């Protein structure tokens, strides 16, 4: 289960990080220009143990700014798990809105990602546990608070925080904890409720299943649900292992149970990723994908297969939508499942970002799996010498008790499995909920595209109006 | 100036700590009974450097609780700089209100005070700088957040935070940062604005001066203002030094300039303390005091003195109101100016609680003094190996920008010099401001007394009504 948990959690990053490629390869002549700057922050904001500092990077674009305006808005992206340049290039909505609002654009890089490494090349050296000690949400929010204070330079400038996915969680929490520094926050696809005890651990897999169930016909999930038994049966013999390896064109054939488990973890992760990037237009992920890729996958699984061999071949065709859409791969290398650097996020799941995942094996198309915190925690200690604090986030940010939050937009696409941990009901009339029925993972933050469905365009219009009001009311 | 700054800041503690004696010596048969319990907290809530823990103490009284009520309110005192038992015994209003609201009473001891010492007897050993590293507001609020979470035990119990002085600051900040854990906060005499750049550094001394000016007649402050020159002139000669020492019955006569400076720092501190405890009834401080002690002091200074010797003797009589009201002291020992343990608070002024004090020497009755941060910071490093962060508090709690705060009562007595750093104007209609024209330092938190002026009784009634509403709305 650990593998799956890590995989699902890590996927938050994958989709954002690879989105960069998508825009760039999309053919649109969109240029994102910025200066790359550095800002010094304390290594530890919350103790007086040392005065050590390091630099975080931020991207700066003032090309839209009206120099005569004494109240220039600042649009501040609360960077998340990845190189900040990728986020800048993949949050086109901020650029479009900055032009309208004549805002200063800032994209702040999250500590421990990109080039904002507190201990340089040895940052992730787990044999130096102090190196990972300051890799927390609170330290990161303090970095942003200091940077905004510096950028405002004592001027009364309205700041709006933006973020997608984990970046959206940071944007929301930032507004909650530092309302004096940001007038409001757009938190897109931010699963702030995906924590122990406040959201069912099977919600992610249930949504993925639902997306697959509604993509073509219901045989899709029935076939996938049955496939685990097929893989198990075939995987029990040498001949079967070869049969699977051949059908999926594995670069490294399955030789033992451990290999089989890795393969199954891999395809389970693919399903989650597919649901997240179920975008309405062609996009790039680990490999290029068609519009609404889940529908394509399920097209190959439209007929119910009773026979193991038939099912195996249908599955192979279906998975190839994801693994080899362009027919350019000679074989499938399951050890490379992401262009993204997941090392940072994996650490965060082992300190504060403890998000339970499970499946009872009947309500979803996934294998049965329990959330085993002990096992998870032991692995975290083994890998990073970290003991996770699963209730840190709820203790500090309130879990479902966010009645006093104001000026936050929580937007969620219903095709996005992370929406299960999102805020879908407004706690009061100062928090706006925007639902995108056809939306996948923070589609609204991306650059406008002719293929955008109406709900995404509507969402962006609403978001723009609310943000304009925050700036005006400031 | 350092001495005076430290003295004025330290006085926050003095008045609270000694208030205990007052209640106990007041003759009222008030019994404060509680169980003393311990609660384990992480040494460092904000990094993953170590898993070290220690215990904080808290006082527990459930005698008022209606066991049939599923929504028992919890009244939670956010302990400040001192032994928690003293606060429990000197916050009579909480006990009175707990009886009415049938609330559970909790008084949490602030880390590094009383018996809540993370490193036991060596906690304040400055040669071990890691020992003082976790002595911050944020770590303390986290202690309280964890304790409340434990006490609520997943039940929907409304919690109200109470605090006076620095404890009031903590109560207010706690509501701002952890609104999901406390329904509201009564912040009595909480100078949350007494920080660099957002409040004039001479406000404290100006209010003290105003209290003295209005106590009897204006000759009082004129005499005190002139006295510095008198002390300087006399202090310039051996004979003059003796003259001062004799007039004030100093146990240790003034022998040099350093002694003279210490003496002047001492009396400057006395003026601040007098204004703070300018209570309407007899009370105990360093020595017993009459009701409205400033009036008594100024009575001895009602005539304008042109002559150094005359002024000196009038000053000596005036100061004796504070130093020897009962006529029991054989001599004045200026090295002992407080029963309170100031060691903790002095550390806090050297990390986050950087409160600038100054006087231009003309608008107040005090000596001219500049706020010299460099000098202050150097001393902090010398004493504790700490480099103060003067803008930490504003960065985190917003300074004057607290527009989004809700369910906080800021009460301030206008006779209290700390009111200059208090919140006297409501930032919105969800924050209540209560002004006590005749009130000294958090008089409203104390037990009802027949001598209470009407404004204090009114304040308590208003506070009770607002708190009842918070509980009902919860």
Image: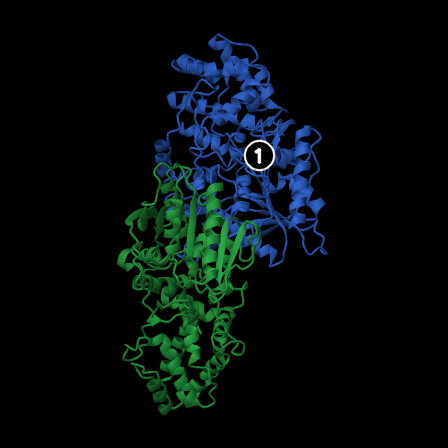
Chain colours: A blue, B green
Q: Is residue B48 above or below residue B27?
A: above
User: What x and y, as percent, mark residue A92?
Assistant: 65, 39
Point out residue B466 in the picture as x, y percentages from the top left corner: 49, 49
Q: Nearer the viewer, residue A110 or A20?
A: A110
Nearest the viewer among A472 and A154 is A472
Q: Quadrant of the N terminus of chain B?
A: bottom left
Residue where numbered disc 1 is placed: A18
A446 to B245, vertically: above or below: above
Q: Nearer the viewer, residue A65 or B405?
A: B405
- Element marked by disc 1: helix
Q: How many marks?
A: 1
Using the image, name the chain to which the residue with label 1 belongs: A
Give coordinates of residue A340: x percent, y percent. 52, 36
Q: Is residue A281 visible?
A: yes
Residue at 48% of width from left, 7% of height from top?
A307
| Label 1 neighbour load within 10 Å: few <14, some 14-19, many 20+ | many
* Residue at horizontal 43 percent and vertical 31 percent from the top: A356
Residue A45 in sight in this render: no
In the visual, does B205 lie left or right of A62?
left
- Please, is residue B201 above or below residue B120 in the view? below
Q: Residue furthest top?
A: A306
Q: Is B272 positioned to the left or the right of A445 in the image?
A: left
Image location (x, y in percent) of residue A11: 51, 32
């Amino acid at each position: 289960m650990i593998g799956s948990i890590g995989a699902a959690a890590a996927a938050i990053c994958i989709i954002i990080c690879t989105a960069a490629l998508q825009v760039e390869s999309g053919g649109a002549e969109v240029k994102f220009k910025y200066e790359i700057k550095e800002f010094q922050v304390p290594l530890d904001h919350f103790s007086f143990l040392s005065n050590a500092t390091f630099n975080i990077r931020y991207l700066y674009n003032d090309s839209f700014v009206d120099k005569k305006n004494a109240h220039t808005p600042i649009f501040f992206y609360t960077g998340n798990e990845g190189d900040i340049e990728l986020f800048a290039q993949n949050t086109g909505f901020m650029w479009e809105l900055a032009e309208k609002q004549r805002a200063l654009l800032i994209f702040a890089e999250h500590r421990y990602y990109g080039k904002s490494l507190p201990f340089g090349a040895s940052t992730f050296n787990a044999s130096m546990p102090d190196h990972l000690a300051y890799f927390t949400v609170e330290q990161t929010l303090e970095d942003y608070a200091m940077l905004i204070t510096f950028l405002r330079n004592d001027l009364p400038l309205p700041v709006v925080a933006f973020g997608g996915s984990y970046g959206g969680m940071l944007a929301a929490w930032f507004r909650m904890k530092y309302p004096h520094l940001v007038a409001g926050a757009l938190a897109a696809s931010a699963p702030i409720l995906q924590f122990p005890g406040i959201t069912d651990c099977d919600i992610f897999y249930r949504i993925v299943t639902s997306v697959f169930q509604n993509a073509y016909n219901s045989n899709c999930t029935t076939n996938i649900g049955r496939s685990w038994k097929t893989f198990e049966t075939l995987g029990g013999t040498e001949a079967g292992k070869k049969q699977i390896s051949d059908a999926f064109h594995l670069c490294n054939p399955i030789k033992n149970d451990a290999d089989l488990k890795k393969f199954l973890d891999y395809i389970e992760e693919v399903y989650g990723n597919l649901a997240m990037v179920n975008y309405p237009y062609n996009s790039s992920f680990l490999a290029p994908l068609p519009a609404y890729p889940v529908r394509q996958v399920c097209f190959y699984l439209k007929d119910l297969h009773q026979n193991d061999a038939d099912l195996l071949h249908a599955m192979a065709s279906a998975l190839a939508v994801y693994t080899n859409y362009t027919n350019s791969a000679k074989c499938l290398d399951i050890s490379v499942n992401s262009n993204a650097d997941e090392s940072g996020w994996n650490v965060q799941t082992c300190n504060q970002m403890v998000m339970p995942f499970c499946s009872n094996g009947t309500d979803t198309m996934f294998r049965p799996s329990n959330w085993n915190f002990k096992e998870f925690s032991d692995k975290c200690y083994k890998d990073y010498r970290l003991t996770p604090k699963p209730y840190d986030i709820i203790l500090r940010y309130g879990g479902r008790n966010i009645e006093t939050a104001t000026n936050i937009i929580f937007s969620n696409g219903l095709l996005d499995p992370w929406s299960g941990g999102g805020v879908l009901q407004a706690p009061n009339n100062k928090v706006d909920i925007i639902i995108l029925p056809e939306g996948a993972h923070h589609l609204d933050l991306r650059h406008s595209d002719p293929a955008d469905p109406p709900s995404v365009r509507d969402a962006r219009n609403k978001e723009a109006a609310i943000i304009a009001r925050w700036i005006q009311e400031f």
